[in-house]
Amino acid sequence: MLFKFKSRATADVIMLEPNGKQLLEIIGKSPNEPHGIITAAQIPAAIRALEEAVAVEEAAAAATAPDEDDQTEEEAPRGDGVRLRQRAAPFIDMLRRSAAEDCDVVW
């Protein structure tokens, strides 16, 4: 399943289900609903929530990151390499542009 976020102010933002659910949970919306709305009035709080979640993730990653000088390439931790900041950036941009034009975001 995909999440397709729409606004009259921007092009659509399409996300895979796990990523869309994660962002909706962060902003306090139910990801289990097939359709929903983020009103223009709710957008500033949604942006703050996403930015705080990004900051928390980055702080946690920095705190648990091993010293790179002590590791060889084989020992380096592997992950998907895509952080919340990168996944949320298009959505945050959509929210900012929608707020500027006083438009709602729907999915």
Image (cartoon, rainbow, N blue to C red):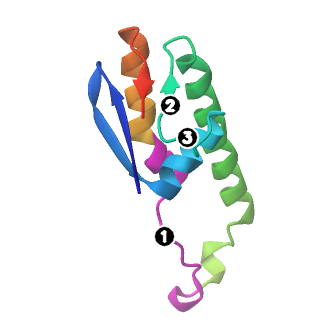
Q: How far apart are marks 1 and 2 (CA)?
A: 29 Å
Residue annotated with mark 3: 33
Three-letter code for the amino acid on which mark 2 is drawn = Gly
Where is residue 75? Give x, y as percent: 60, 88
Q: Earlier in the sequence, mark 1 or mark 2?
A: 2
Any mark on residue 80, and which?
1
Q: Please indicate whether residue 12 sits to the left or right of residue 29 in the image.
A: left
Q: Please, is residue 88 above or below residue 44 in the view?
A: below
Count neighbours of disc 2 (C-alpha within 10 A) and say few if under 14, some if 14 to 19, many if 20 or more: some
Contact? badges 1 and 3 (CB < 8 Å): no
Three-letter code for the amino acid on which mark 3 is drawn = Glu
Image quadrant holding the N terminus, namely bottom left
Residue 78, picture quadrant: bottom right
Count neighbours of disc 3 (C-alpha within 10 A) and say few if under 14, some if 14 to 19, many if 20 or more: few
Question: Which residues are drawn in magenta?
Answer: 72-88
Front disc: 1 or 2: 2
Residue annotated with mark 2: 36
